[in-house]
Image: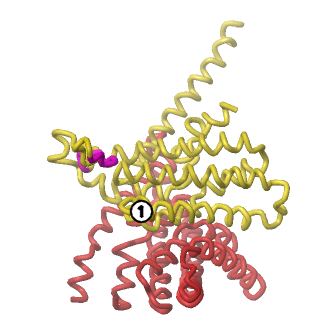
Amino acid sequence: MIKELTKGIFKENPLFIIVLGLCPALAVSTEVINAIGMGAGVIFVLLGSNVFISLLRNFIPEKVRIPCYVIVIASFVTIVDMVMGAWLPVLSRNLGIYIPLIVVNCIILGRAEAFANKNTVGRSVMDAIGMGIGFTLSLLLIAAVREIFGNGTITLFPIPFLQFDGIIRIPGLSSMPARVLGLSSGALFVMGYFKALFNWLEQKQKESAANSLVEPVIQEQ
Amino acid sequence: MSYVGIIITFVFVENFILSRFLGLCPFIGVSRKMESAVGMGFAVIFVMAMASIITTLIYNYLLITFNITFLKTIVFILVIAALVQFVEMVIQKNSPPLYKALGIYLPLITTNCAVLGIAMIAVEKEFNVFESFVAGVSAGAGFMLSIVLMSALREKFETEWIPKPFRGMPIAFITAGLMALAFMAFDKALLKNLLG
C-alpha cells in the first residue's frame, strides 16, 4: 500500500521521470501560488476519477472505456472550475484556460487506464494521492526556481491580520532578478535542466547498481 | 479583432507551443523526424479547424441558448473525441493515401491540449464561427511551424556530441526555450505597429 503512495513521488514521478502533464505544468509555474492551486486541482480530479473508475471497473464495457473515463474526469474538472471560480476568483483568473485543460492532462487519463481500472479502490486512492503529490511537488519546484530567480519573490496566500500581503521578497534578488526565467522560454529552460539532472541521477544510480553486481564476481575469482 | 490580427496573433505572438505551452507533449514526442513532424502538423491543422468551428457552433447556439455554459468542458471534450474518431473513419474510407500519411497521428490528437485549448480560447475571446475557424487554422499553422523547425534542429543533433544526461528530451526542452526567446521578437507591439 505504502509503495503505491511513494512510487508517484520518486520512482515514477509524473513530471520529471515519465514526463506527462507538461502543458499546465509549464504554463502556470510563474508563481508559487499558481502551482499550489494547479496541484490541488489535479490532486482532487485524480482522486475523484481514480475512485470512480475503480468502483465502476466491472461495469464499464471494454470498448467504450476511454469515453467513459473522459466523462468522469471532465465532471470532476467542471467541479474544480466552478468551486475555484466561486471562492478563489483571483487564482481562477490566473490559471485561466489551464483549469478546463486538466481534462486533457495525460497524467489523469494515464492513471485511469494504467492503474484504476485494474485495481481496488484502496490502492487506487493511494496511487492517486501519490501521483498527485508527486506532480504538485515537481510543479512547486519549477515554480519556486522560476519565481525566486526570475522575480525575487515567493507569492503565497495573503494573511490580512498578520499584515502579510502574501508575497515574500528575497533581499538582493528582487532588485535584480533574471527576468528570462519568468518568461515562457524560462519555463522550458528550467524543465530541460531539471530533466537532465534527473537523467544524471538515474544514470548514476544504475552505474552504482551495476558496480555492486560486478564486485561479488571479482571476489569469487 | 481583424482577421489579419487573429492570424498574426495565433501563428506568432501567442504561438501555441512556445508561448502558451499547448500541445507540448506531441511537440517533444513527434519532433524527431522531419517527415513525421510535417504529418503531425497537417493533422493538427485539420482537426483544429474542424474542432473550432463545431465547438463554437455548439457553444453559441446550444449552450448559450439553453443556459448551460457550465457544461462546456464536458461537451467540448466529447465533441472533440467524437470528431477525431469520425475524421479518422472518413479519411480511412475515402482517401487511403491521406490516411496512410495522417492516420497514426489522429488518435494522438484527442489528448492534445491544443485542440481543447483553441475551443476554450474561442469561448473566452467571444469569437464568432468564422473568426474561430481562422483562429483554429492559424493556431494549427503556428503549431506546425514550431514543430517543423524543431524537427529540423533535432535531426542536426543526431550528428553532434551532446553530454549524456542532456541527450533526448532535455536538449529538446532547452532548444525550445531558445526558440521561444527568438519568438519574443513577435510581441503585441508588433501587432499594434502593423495594424495601427
What is the letter of the red chain? B
Instruction: Please give the chain letter of the residue carrying mark 1.
Output: A
Residue at position x 72%, y 81% from top? B86
Answer yes or no: is residue B101 visible.
no
Against A137, residue B35 (above or below) is below
Asked whether residue B157 is in view, the answer is yes
Q: Residue visible at 51% across and 39% down?
A: A199
Residue A153 is one of the magenta-drawn residues: yes
Task: Inspect the magenta stretch and tell me whether residue A165 lies in it.
Answer: no
- Report the residue at 58% width, 63% height from top: A103
Q: Residue furthest front?
A: A161
Residue B16 picture quarter: bottom left
Q: Which colour denotes chain A? A: yellow
Q: Is residue B67 above or below residue A28?
A: below
Question: Where, quadrant-wise, is the N terminus of chain A in this rendering?
Answer: top right
- Crowding around mark 1 (Cα neighbors within 10 Å: few <14, some 14 to 19, many 20+) is many
Residue A73 x/y as whole percent: 64, 61
Q: Residue A200, image x and y in percent?
A: 48, 35
Q: Position of residue A182 (x, y in %)?
A: 30, 55
Q: Which residue is mark 1?
A: A92
Q: Amino acid at mark 1?
A: Ser
Q: Position of residue A147 (x, y in %)?
A: 30, 48
Q: Residue at x 23, y 83 (%)?
A: B192
Which stretch did the figure color magenta? A151-160
Q: How is the protein colored in the picture?
A: by chain
Quarter in which the C terminus of chain A is drawn:
top right
